[in-house]
Amino acid sequence: MTEFYSSSFEETLEWGEKIGKQLRPGDIVALNGDLGAGKTSISKGIALALGIKDDITSPTYTIVSEYDGEIPLYHMDMYRIDGIEEFELLGVDELLFGNGVSLIEWSERISEYLPDDCKSLQISILEDGRRKIILKGINL
Ligand SMILES: Nc1ncnc2c1ncn2[C@@H]1O[C@H](COP(=O)(O)OP(=O)(O)O)[C@@H](O)[C@H]1O
Ligand SMILES: [Mg+2]
């Protein structure tokens, strides 16, 4: 487990790049944190490290956004998934076992698909506005 802090969007982006450099095809990372904590911001940094040129947007209204880079990125949001059946029906499970990196918001909704030692990233907003980021399973 690693813990670090970010005082700005730019700093969060840099942490995202550092994290992205450690990721390999097939890696799954659960992204946790409240709305506005910085999940999309850190995902933008991860995307930069994977050689993705497209802008990463919040996937709230889409279940999966796919981005092409040196390693493909699947940015997933399980908030609107109505049970594991829908997840399987949409074929999202296939992506998890593919050659891309999967970043998953609301990952607890599909916990039965995730490895017990799933990599994860928890972002929280401190009283002074800084972000505290806790990484599990990823060494920087
Ligand atoms: N240290 C910080 N890290 C990330 N975002 C920050 C930080 N400080 C302020 N912000 C702002 O907070 C918002 C985070 O939004 P976003 O990354 O979309 O959050 P989420 O995807 O978790 O809902 C952005 O508007 C960003 O500019
Ligand atoms: Mg977001």
Image (cartoon, rainbow, N blue to C red):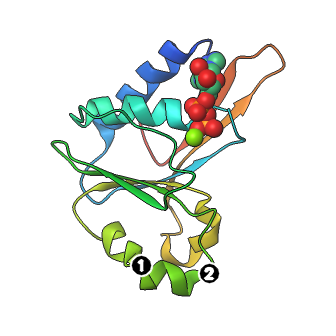
Q: Label 1 neighbourhood size at 10 Å, few (<14), some (14-19), many (20+)?
A: few
Q: Of residues 131 and 47, which is closer to you in this image?
A: 47
- List the residue tagged with mark 1: 90
Q: Residue at the location (78% across, 23% down)?
A: 126
Q: Amino acid at mark 1?
A: Leu
Displayed-image quarter of ligand 1: top right
Does the beta carbon at disc 2 come under 8 Å from ligand 2?
Answer: no
Local SS, label 1: loop
Q: Residue furthest front?
A: 61
Q: Position of residue 62 (x, y in %)?
A: 49, 57
Relative to 37, is 10 on the left or the right? left
- List the residue tagged with mark 2: 83
Q: Position of residue 28 (x, y in %)?
A: 41, 57
Q: Position of residue 96 (x, y in %)?
A: 36, 68
Q: Position of residue 5 (x, y in %)?
A: 62, 20
Q: Quarter holding the N terminus?
A: top right
Q: Residue at the location (51% across, 29% down)?
A: 41
Q: Of residues 126 and 39, which is closer to you in this image?
A: 39
Residue 17 in sight from this viewpoint: yes
Relative to 75, is 122 on the left or the right? right
Q: Residue at the location (40% across, 37% down)?
A: 56
Residue 112, picture quadrant: bottom right
Local SS, label 2: loop
Which of the two marks, 1 or 2, is nearer to us in this view? 1
Residue 50, picture quadrant: top left
Q: Label 2 neighbourhood size at 10 Å, few (<14), some (14-19), many (20+)?
A: few
Q: Residue at the location (56% across, 82% down)?
A: 84
Give the alpha-carbon distance from disc 1 to disc 2, as whole Å. 11 Å
